[in-house]
Amino acid sequence: MKIGIVGLPQVGKTTVFRLATGQHEPPAGRAPLEPTQAIAPVPDQRLTALGRMHPGKKAVPATVAYLDSPAVQRGAGKGEGLGSPILTPLRQADALLHVVRAFEDARIPHVEGSLDPSRDVGLLHTELLLADLEVAEKRVARIEEALRKGRKDQNVRELEALRRSADALQAGRPLRDVDFPPEQERLLRGFQFLTAKPLLLLVNIGEEDLGKEEAILAGLRPFAGPRVALLAFAAKTEAEIARLSPEDAALFRREMGIAEPGAARLLNVSYGLLGLVTFFTVGDQEVRAWTFRRGASALEAAGTIHTDFARGFIKAEVVPFTALAEAGSLPAARKKGVLRLEGKDYPVADGDVITIRFSV
Ligand SMILES: Nc1nc2c(ncn2[C@@H]2O[C@H](COP(=O)(O)OP(=O)(O)OP(=O)(O)O)[C@@H](O)[C@H]2O)c(=O)[nH]1
Ligand SMILES: [Mg+2]
């Protein structure tokens, strides 16, 4: 999973990136307009417990990649200024994380001259809509040109899907809100439209506003939806706390009423937004966590682990993590009869510990 961080200048994008990835130094030799990417392990207490259950095996966490981009400015969507070099790398992301400034700080001037989260969300929406519109219109023009030279059915269908996209974008609708039939959706996937991606609006609040998250988010509720999540976050404070020892960090969080570390909250919301779950495997050398689409089948899970597992798939041996933890070990769980044999269509559930039986 890859999450692309976007936002206006000086809103806390890099602060969030560092908090999420633990990476504090920009890589040497990076060009100023290139995004920084870092991979972060997904902390999971269940994996830690599985590791303890299997001393001698390495615990390998699932990972998430974060992309920190330079600031988006007005006009970026039309390719003005530094528009395209900033927006194009974000097209590879599975989701966008828009950092919205809500903290007051007279020393850090706001690019729009005042603090107004709703305006900023709208502003960024517009730039992303325009960037997608440009991609759609360019392609429409090219297909129309091709059609003038000779008709191809594939082109006609693509043109239809793109015209629908362009109409929606022109009307100010992000593509994630448009219900495309599966065939059109497939045709459009390759364009990696920015407004088709799930969006996490991360409102960066000041420390003094901890406890007032609900009131601050209220103004942004109209933007939320099935594929747009809202989260308030004191990024700078979270980053400062994350540098403390675990004991001190826990103490500070309690004092400030922060129930869960910021980086973990960010991950939970991202998993929910993207419909992801975690399953586990216990191999010869390692116990491992895997990120997976909710509702995907045991056969697809097997393919994620190893193509041979999918090709020679016989059965999946499944035990929910909680049942395994209760039994204490896989052999004990097997003895207790809490291990189930499932076929290739079994929908993998969050927390499943899976052993694939396969033939070579
Ligand atoms: N007071 C306050 N300052 C913050 C907060 N979050 C970030 N900052 C400060 O705002 C400045 C910009 O933060 P960055 O994380 O670099 O912001 P950015 O969006 O990456 O900035 P650009 O990449 O230059 O567009 C830094 O001085 C941060 O310390 C906050 O919650 N409160
Ligand atoms: Mg930055």
Image: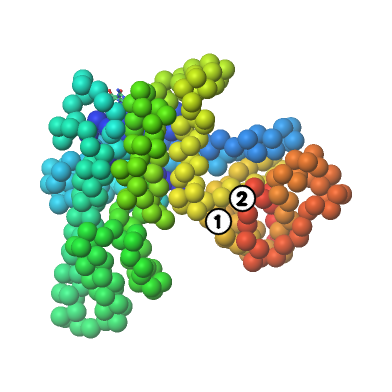
The percent position of residue 204, horizontal first and vertical second, equals 34, 33
Drawn side of residue 236 relative to residue 296, left or right = left
The residue carrying pointer 2 sits among few (fewer than 14), some (14 to 19) or many (20 or more) residues within 10 Å by Cα, namely some
Instruction: State the residue in front, 307 or 8.
Output: 8
Q: CA distance from mark 2 to mark 1?
A: 8 Å
The percent position of residue 96, horizontal first and vertical second, equals 35, 47
Looking at the rendered structure, the kind of residue marked 2 is Asp
Q: Is residue 140 above or below residue 128?
A: below
Is residue 117 visible in this depiction of the protein? Answer: yes
Query: Which residue is at 63% across, 35% downward?
Result: 45
Drawn side of residue 307 relative to residue 340, left or right = left
Is the residue under label 1 in contact with that under label 2 (CB below 8 Å)?
yes
Q: Secondary structure at mark 1?
A: loop
The percent position of residue 272, horizontal first and vertical second, equals 49, 49
Query: Which residue is at 30% across, 55% downward?
Result: 195
Q: Secondary structure at mark 2?
A: loop
Is residue 15 visible in this depiction of the protein? Answer: no
Looking at the rendered structure, the kind of residue marked 1 is Arg
Instruction: State the residue in front, 333 or 356.
Output: 333
Q: Which residue is mark 2?
A: 350
Residue 294, disc: 1
The answer to which of marks 2 and 1 sits earlier in the sequence is 1
Query: Which residue is at 75% across, 40% downward?
Result: 325
Drawn side of residue 211 relative to residue 98, left or right = right
The percent position of residue 124, horizontal first and vertical second, equals 23, 46
Q: Is residue 184 above or below residue 310?
A: below
